């Protein structure tokens, strides 16, 4: 089965070193939650985030939302031919189960992920829809054991979505950055077998996911 990993995703709860910042406290109070229970979002916490490690790769949970919506609303997912994982910037792995309907409203998505961080699993009856575990990208790769790992970056070998799709086998893993700017860390790069660029422009993650999975679907369904 094909695997998709959204790597180093800009999705995390407020880290401890930022929880006492006035912008964080104010936002948490409006939501009626403790600062540790809300997602880091540069729309609200820009002042608090100034100067933190990997600042440009953090605080964009909306980008993750767009990307996961793209990946879970296509035939490849509905017919259980792809497994989707979110690897977060702070080394958590979110496992997405089968036939999960990700909320289209960002505010509902935000609430769902905050609940996931608190409860660790989201279930419907006996079915586990979402699960979060403290785990690194390397540990996830060791778990799923893909035959080939294909990454996307402007630093990669220039190619096209169509050509890349022809190189994807059933047990391959596609890795796309779940952040706004920057590049994969060395720990990610070291695991990637082929790194591709799909143009001189830097596309957002959800665009790459939509186009890449569409081209791959052609090889599966057409």
Image (spheres, rainbow, N blue to C red):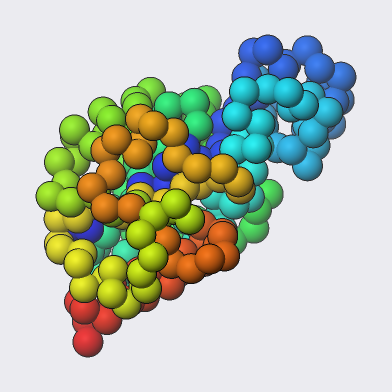
Q: In this view, does 70 lie to the left or right of 59?
A: left
Which residue is at a point 43% across and 27% down the rendered structure image? 91
Q: Is residue 77 left or right of residue 182?
A: left
Between 108 and 76, the one lying in front of the other is 76
Give above or below for 33 relative to 183. Answer: above
Q: Quadrant of residue 219?
A: bottom left
Where, quadrant-wise, is the N terminus in this rendering?
bottom left
Between 60 and 53, the one lying in front of the other is 53
Residue 203 location (% of width, % of height): 55, 62
Q: In which quarter of the image is residue 103?
A: bottom right
Q: Quadrant of residue 137?
A: top left
Q: Can residue 125 be seen in this view?
A: no
Residue 77 location (% of width, % of height): 32, 64
Residue 198 location (% of width, % of height): 43, 67
Q: Is residue 154 visible?
A: yes
Which residue is at a point 28% across and 44% down the rendered structure image? 192
Which residue is at a point 22% across and 87% down the rendered structure image? 222
Which residue is at a point 13% across and 50% down the rendered structure image? 147
Residue 83 location (% of width, % of height): 28, 53
Tally of marks: 0
Give above or below for 58 relative to 193. Answer: above
Q: Is residue 52 left or right of residue 219?
A: right
Give above or below for 195 relative to 190. Answer: below
């Amino acid at each position: 089965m094909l695997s998709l990993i959204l790597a180093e995703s800009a999705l995390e709860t407020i880290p401890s070193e930022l929880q006492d910042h006035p912008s964080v406290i104010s936002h948490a109070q409006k939501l009626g939650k403790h600062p540790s229970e809300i997602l880091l979002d540069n729309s609200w916490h820009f002042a608090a985030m100034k100067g933190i490690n990997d600042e440009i790769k953090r605080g964009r949970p909306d980008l993750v939302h767009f990307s996961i919506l793209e990946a879970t609303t296509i035939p490849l997912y509905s017919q259980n031919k792809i497994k989707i994982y979110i690897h977060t910037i702070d080394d958590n792995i979110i496992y997405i189960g089968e036939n999960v309907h990700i909320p289209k409203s960002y505010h509902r998505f935000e609430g769902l992920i905050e609940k996931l961080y608190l409860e660790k699993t989201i279930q419907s009856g006996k079915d586990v829809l979402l699960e979060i575990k403290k785990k690194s990208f390397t540990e996830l790769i060791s778990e799923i054991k893909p035959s080939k790992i294909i990454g996307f970056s402007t630093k990669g070998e220039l190619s096209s979505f169509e050509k890349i799709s022809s190189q994807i086998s059933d047990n391959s893993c596609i890795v796309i950055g779940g952040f706004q700017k920057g590049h994969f860390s060395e720990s990610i790069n070291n695991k990637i077998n082929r790194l591709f660029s799909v143009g001189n422009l830097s596309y957002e993650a959800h665009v790459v996911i939509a186009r890449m999975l569409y081209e791959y679907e052609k090889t599966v369904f057409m």
